[in-house]
Amino acid sequence: MSTATDTYAVSAKYYDQAYGAKQDLADLPFYLDLARQIGRPVLELACGTGRVLLPIARQGIAIHGVDNSAPMLAELQKKLEREPKDVRELVSTVHADIRSFRSNRRYPLVMIPFRPMQHMYTVEDQINALKTAAFHLEPEGVLAFDVFYPKYDMVFSGIGSEILDLEWTLQAEPGTIMRRFFKKHTVDKIAQTFAASFIYRTYRDGKLVKEEAEPLKMSWYTYPHLRALFLLAGLEVKEEYGSFELTPLDNNAGQMIFILKKSA
Ligand SMILES: C[S@@+](CC[C@H](N)C(=O)[O-])C[C@H]1O[C@@H](n2cnc3c(N)ncnc32)[C@H](O)[C@@H]1O
């Protein structure tokens, strides 16, 4: 079931600024291209603040987003209100859990960008989320999603240490710097999950003025594990990549990126 770690209540406030500052986040062109090639309308499961959803709508493509975090959807809503009417009219959102969400629409493209599948912590939840995606596909439709390939030396190390993960300046408040730290608390090698926190620190004129922390739990996948989940969810691989530059899914892979279709 959902846990408090899924709320993104603190992260929602900083999500767009933080990932805007992340130079190596290269997924957007991949999902935008897919939407341009296949979309109309698109279903995004776990759409968050609309980091991917809004650029797709701005291309004139209708997109429906589902997320179970009210704070993340509220950020998306704020951004939508600043968009022109023709973009706003292409977007609809639902506050729901992707493990159980059902609508009566079918889509040529369903996407789960930027690792929400890593918020599925049990095999049952993982299958249920993939079944939700499969349920909403048109007969020839495709599901695209990504997870990271686990760097095992990093997964099992650094427990208890704080790592400076991202830093950005607040344009609206000159002299204010935000830093996000990552602190891992525990690793469960059997469940393939780790529990951590993001710690957001605000510095004004060099002085720490605010600290906010939010728990983060993530699972990690191996490739055979994913292939077994696809079988159980009635999906099969159409394309797979090891990076957003579309390199092969091999020993150099940093990501595991899939384009799936419903099994025959
Ligand atoms: C890393 S964010 C990705 C958001 C967006 N897809 C993006 O690319 O920026 C993960 C999102 O998954 C959502 N999420 C986690 N578990 C969920 C669940 N069971 N049902 C719906 N959304 C969920 C979170 O609320 C959060 O918005």
Image (cartoon, helix red, strand yellow):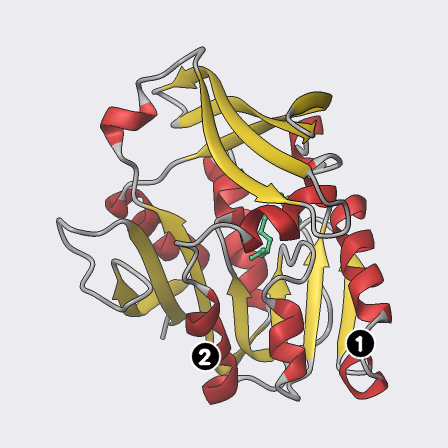
Q: Which of 125 and 162 is in front in this view?
A: 162
Residue holding disc 1: 83
Number of numbered discs visible in the structure rendering:
2
Image x and y of residue 248, in percent: 18, 63
Q: Which of 21 and 197 is in front in this view?
A: 21
Q: Which of marks 2 and 1 is in front?
A: 1
Where disc 1 sits, the SS reads loop
Say what amino acid the circle numbered 1 marks: Glu
Marks 2 and 1 sit apart, C-alpha to C-alpha, by 22 Å
Q: How crowded is mark 2: few (under 14 residues within 10 Å), some or many (20 or more)?
A: some
Question: 83 left or right of 207?
Answer: right
Mark 2 CB near ligand 1 (8 Å cut): no
Q: Which residue is drawn at 70% across and 59% down?
A: 66
Q: Residues within 10 Å of mark 1 (few under 14, many from 20)?
A: some
Query: Does residue 142 show up?
Result: yes
Where disc 2 sits, the SS reads helix
256 versus 9 height, above or below: below
Q: Residue at x 68, y 34 (%)?
A: 2
Image x and y of residue 163, in percent: 44, 24
92 versus 146 height, above or below: below
Image x and y of residue 200, in percent: 64, 29
Outermost residue to the top: 160
Say what amino acid the circle numbered 2 marks: Leu
64 versus 115 height, above or below: below
Q: Earlier in the sequence, mark 2 or mark 1?
A: 2
> What label does residue 34 carry, if any?
2
Q: Nearer the viewer, residue 134 or 67?
A: 67
Query: Does residue 134 show up?
Result: no
Q: Residue at x 67, y 71 (%)?
A: 54
Q: Are marks 2 and 1 in contact (CB under 8 Å)?
A: no
The quarter holding residue 239 reads bottom left
